[in-house]
Image (cartoon, grey):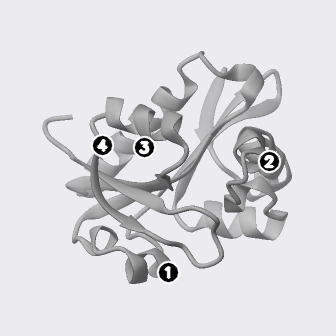
Amino acid sequence: MILRSFTHDDAPALTTLLHRAYAELGEAGLNFTAVDQDEGTTLRRASGGQTWVIEEEGALVAALTVSWPAEDALQELSSAAREPNRAWLNQLAVDPDHRGKGYARQLRDVGVDWCVAQGATSIGLDAARPAAHLVALYAAWDFVEAESIQWPGKTYASIVMTRAFGSE
């Protein structure tokens, strides 16, 4: 297992990973961007922050992007995203065949460490409210609900969750 920074050459493999990781949510009627985004969107989103990938036997099996500040469109929807010194967790993905190995937690830890080193005092995320397993995961990671938002064109309401940094 290799945890490393994303490179532009990873865009095709990351796009495939995102499609696989978000497929079950798409099948449940949740039209996450990651369900069917093209490589250009993947590159734009991954380049909009610091992105890490986990590689296993030459294949990307997990990824996470942290943005600071949150993207403008999100800041327009969420007062939590406009908070000073708040980073934003995006595009967390683990290939279904590689879940349960702790990859999401490892990526979260790397992302949090990076945020703290940059001077961020908290981190936020938004998740589909109907994706109860994701909301529960983030709550277990000490994220708390801050507000609800509605992304234009999405079939679901999103929950915005935040986590303050202590003595990481």
Residue position marked by numbered label 2 in the rendering: 19
**Residue 2 location (% of width, % of height):** 65, 26
Three-letter amino acid code at disc 2? His
Q: Residue at horizontal 82%, vertical 31%? A: 59
Residue 141 drawn above or below residue 37: above
Q: Secondary structure at mark 1?
A: helix
Instruction: Single out the mark in the foreground, 3 or 4.
Output: 4
Residues packed near mark 2 inside 10 Å, few (<14), some (14 to 19) or many (20 plus): many
**Residue 93 location (% of width, % of height):** 64, 41
Q: Is residue 32 left or right of residue 127?
A: right
Q: Secondary structure at mark 4?
A: loop
Q: Earlier in the sequence, mark 4 or mark 1?
A: 1
How far apart marks 3 and 2 lie (CA) works out to: 22 Å
Assess whether mark 1 and mark 4 are in contact (beta carbons under 8 angstroms).
no
Q: Which mark is residue 111?
A: 3
Q: Earlier in the sequence, mark 4 or mark 2?
A: 2
How far apart marks 4 and 1 lie (CA) works out to: 22 Å
How far apart marks 1 and 2 lie (CA) works out to: 22 Å
Q: Secondary structure at mark 2?
A: helix
Q: Earlier in the sequence, mark 1 or mark 2?
A: 2
Q: Earlier in the sequence, mark 3 or mark 4?
A: 3
Quadrant occupied by the N terminus: top right
Quadrant occupied by the C terminus: top left
Residue position marked by numbered label 4 in the rendering: 143
Q: Earlier in the sequence, mark 3 or mark 1?
A: 1
How far apart marks 3 and 1 lie (CA) works out to: 22 Å
Q: Residue at horizontal 23%, vertical 71%? A: 83
Residue position marked by numbered label 1 in the rendering: 73
**Front in this rendered view, residue 76 or 66:** 76
Q: Is residue 134 left or right of residue 34?
A: left
